[in-house]
Image (spheres, helix red, strand yellow):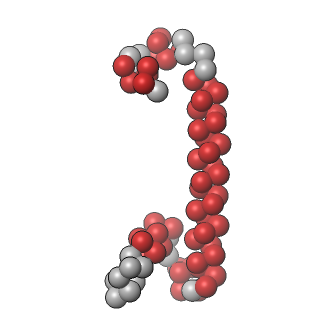
């Protein structure tokens, strides 16, 4: 990615042979993280059914404020 940042032209990026493999691995890791996050949010929603009515973004915001119970 450093090489892409230095010269982001399409011609240069096409010449990076290992870039496809790097992006595939990164995408796989991202999917794993997203699945883990979704499972975590579903587990919290199972404990508090009212959370089912919130979007994932709203639920993350609420859970990030757990150090301040009044904000939750």
Taking the view exactly as shown, the residue that stands out farthest to the front is 67
Q: Is residue 2 above or below residue 46?
A: above
Q: Is residue 56 visible?
A: yes
15 with respect to 31 (left or right): left
**21 vs 27: above or below:** above
x then y, percent, for residue 34: 59, 55
Up/down of 31 relative to 54, above or below: above
Left or right: 36 as drawn, with respect to 68: right
Number of marks in picture: 0
Residue at image point 63% right, 60% down: 36
> Relative to the observer, which residue lies in front, 15 or 67?
67
The image shows residue 60 at horizontal and vertical percentages of 46, 69
Which quadrant holds residue 33? bottom right
Residue appearing at x 57%, y 23% in the figure = 19
Q: Is residue 58 visible?
A: no
Name the quadrant of the C terminus.
bottom left
Q: Tell me where residue 28 sits by quadrant.
A: top right
Residue drawn 58% across and 47% down?
A: 30
* Of residues 71 and 51, the one drawn nearer to the viewer in this rendering: 71
Rendered position, 57 above or below 24: below
x 38%, y 24%: residue: 5
- Where's residue 35, x and y in %? 64, 58
């Amino acid at each position: 990615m450093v090489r892409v940042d230095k010269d982001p032209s399409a011609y240069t990026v096409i010449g990076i042979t290992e870039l496809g493999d790097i992006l595939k691995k990164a995408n796989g890791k991202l999917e794993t993280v997203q699945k883990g996050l979704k499972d975590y949010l579903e587990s919290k929603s199972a404990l508090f059914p009212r959370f089912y009515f919130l979007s994932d973004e709203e639920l993350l915001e609420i859970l990030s404020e757990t150090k301040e119970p009044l904000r939750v």
